[in-house]
Each structure stands twice: as structure tokens, then as C-alpha cells.
């Protein structure tokens, strides 16, 4: 995020030089007005708006993952329901095991979605 540091010259000249030794000025550079020096620099912390966009993208990704898992679960359930449990015991048990695993993964995606929605609401309230 773009920041501005102000120095009073000549009183803070040593402090300004020390600051410039450790911070690279941004495109706006260094500006002078009367006895003030303004240094524009980037501190590389994301703004709240940027963080909000990232969280919204994560939320959409989590929703898409949950939908894909739900589709896979539905498909496996239909495949398993079409099997004869005794004649296809191995396949039936394999699908049952995958369905149990997928159910826990769907719940995990639900928790992620709930968490992200809460963070987005909190961040939106701060803007």
C-alpha cells in the first residue's frame, strides 16, 4: 500500500537520510514543499479492499469445490445404488468408503465457506 513519510528540513535531515537508505521511493518519488520533504513509498501491505477481493475469490473457489464434490457424491451414490450388494461386494464397499470420505470433505468445504463468509462480513464492516 502506498505510504507517505514527511520530514521537516533541515531539522530531520539525518532521519530522512536514514529512512531513504532503507526505503525505496515509489513512482511519485520525493517531493519538497517549503521546509518539508514528502517521501512516497510502498510498504507492500495489502489494502482492506484488496484483501476483501482475495477472500471473495477464495469463497468462490470453496463453493466451486463443494459443488464438484457434491456432484461426485451424487454420481457415486447412483452408481452404488445400482449395484447388487452381494454380487458386487468389493465395488459396493469401495464406493461406500469413497462416499464416506467425500461426505467429510463436503462438510470441510462447508466449514471453509462459513469461515470465509464470516471474514468477509467482518472486513466489509471495517470498510
Image (spheres, helix red, strand yellow):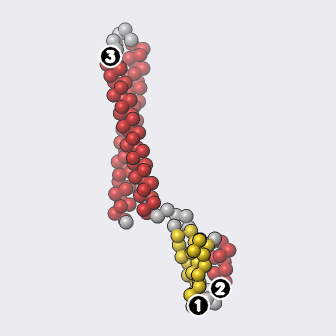
Q: Quadrant of the C terminus?
A: bottom left
Residue wearing tag 3:
82
Q: Secondary structure under badge 2?
A: helix
> 73 above or below 50?
above
Badge 2: residue crowd in 10 Å (few <14, some 14–19, many ≥20): few
Residue wearing tag 2:
13
- Quarter holding residue 44: bottom right
Q: Is residue 24 visible?
A: yes
Q: Earlier in the sequence, mark 2 or mark 1?
A: 2
Q: Secondary structure under badge 1?
A: loop
Badge 1: residue crowd in 10 Å (few <14, some 14–19, many ≥20): few
Q: Earlier in the sequence, mark 3 or mark 1?
A: 1
Residue wearing tag 1:
35
- Quarter holding residue 92: top left
Total residue callouts? 3
Q: Is residue 104 visible?
A: no
Q: Earlier in the sequence, mark 3 or mark 2?
A: 2
Residue at point 45%, 60% (across, down): 50
Amino acid at each position: 500500500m502506498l505510504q507517505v513519510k514527511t520530514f521537516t528540513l533541515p531539522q530531520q535531515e539525518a532521519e530522512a537520510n536514514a529512512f531513504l537508505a532503507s526505503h525505496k521511493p515509489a513512482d511519485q518519488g520525493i517531493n519538497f514543499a517549503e521546509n518539508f520533504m514528502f517521501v512516497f513509498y510502498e510498504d507492500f501491505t495489502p489494502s482492506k479492499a484488496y484483501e476483501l477481493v482475495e477472500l471473495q475469490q477464495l469463497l468462490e473457489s470453496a463453493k466451486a469445490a463443494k459443488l464438484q464434490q457434491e456432484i461426485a457424491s451424487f454420481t457415486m451414490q447412483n452408481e452404488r445404488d445400482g449395484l447388487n450388494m452381494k454380487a458386487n461386494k468389493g465395488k459396493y464397499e469401495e464406493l461406500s468408503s469413497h462416499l464416506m470420505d467425500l461426505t467429510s470433505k463436503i462438510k470441510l468445504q462447508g466449514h471453509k465457506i462459513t469461515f470465509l463468509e464470516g471474514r468477509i462480513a467482518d472486513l466489509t464492516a471495517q470498510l
